[in-house]
Image (cartoon, rainbow, N blue to C red):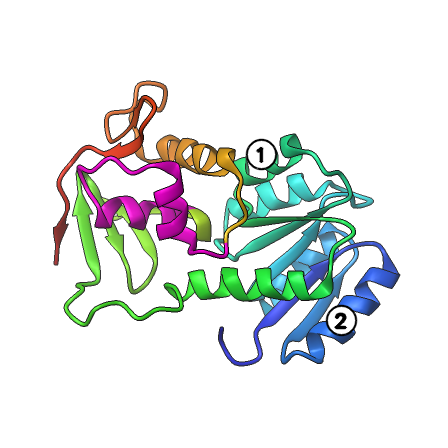
Amino acid sequence: MTPMPHVLLVDDDEDILTLLTHFLQNHACRVSVARDGAEMFAVLEERGADVVVLDVMLPDESGFDLCRRLRATSSVPVIMLTAVSDHTDRVVGLEIGADDYLTKPFNSRELLARIKAVLRRGEGGSAPRPKDTRPMLSFGRWRLDITRRELRSDDNTLVPLSTGEFDLLLAFAEHPQRVLTRDILMDIARGESHAAFDRSIDVQVSRLRRKLEDSPKSPELIRTIRNGGYILMVPVSRS
């Protein structure tokens, strides 16, 4: 976790904003607040953020719509908040690029733990990589830059990835041509702190396919192994 990470809280509930602002500031975070989408994008343009905590229910646009707009231009980690304990909402959030999800009411310490987790993943994980690991992984027509956390095509076009998408693709690229179960993928990409949620890996794989595959409905790069998991079909080279 970087020193004094900047957390942007987006919620129209003043009590929640006040409570979380004081709590996070007391735990070495810089905090900005926004009450709707217009304020959120104004803060991001002026000051940026290391992580966005985004409520689903907002007065102008839903958190889903704002996350979708944000993902078109930014890979900043997003943790979504909802008052609805429904896996359908969680699937929707993951499909549009959210990195994590928390249901109200929640414990402030749990939110802090989630913030630390997405920031660690954004820095490449809490455990250092071996010194001989090279920063560029190439497969098919794609290049994955580990240092910059970027995916580019063979014509150098940058493909935006959320933190979760990058971590999952890195897991595939570091274990090519091997069948990886959903549990293994979650352990590799998210570590032991992840919450059990079987559909989350399926949703993230679906998003990756839409960005990587010529025909996402007939994938050639990341294939599903029935009753097994997923496999990256092509070899990977390091440079």
Q: Which amino acid does label 1 sit on?
A: Val
For label 2, the SS is: helix
Which residue is pictured at 65% across the width and 40% down the height?
A: 64
Kindly report the secondary structure that dominates the magenta region of the rendered protein. Answer: helix
As drawn, is 202 to the left or to the right of 174? right
Query: Is the residue marked by circle 2 packed among few (<14), some (14-19), or many (20+) residues within 10 Å?
Result: many
For label 1, the SS is: helix
Image coordinates for residue 230, horizontal then vertical, percent: 30, 32
Q: Residue 117 carries which label?
A: none
- The disc, 2 or 1, on the residue closer to the chain's N-terminal end is 2
Give the residues in magenta: 165-193
Residue beneath disc 2? 21
Q: Which amino acid does label 2 sit on?
A: Thr
Up-down relation of residue 220 to residue 191 (above or below): above
Which residue is pictured at 40% across the width and 68% down the height?
A: 126
Residue beneath disc 1? 91
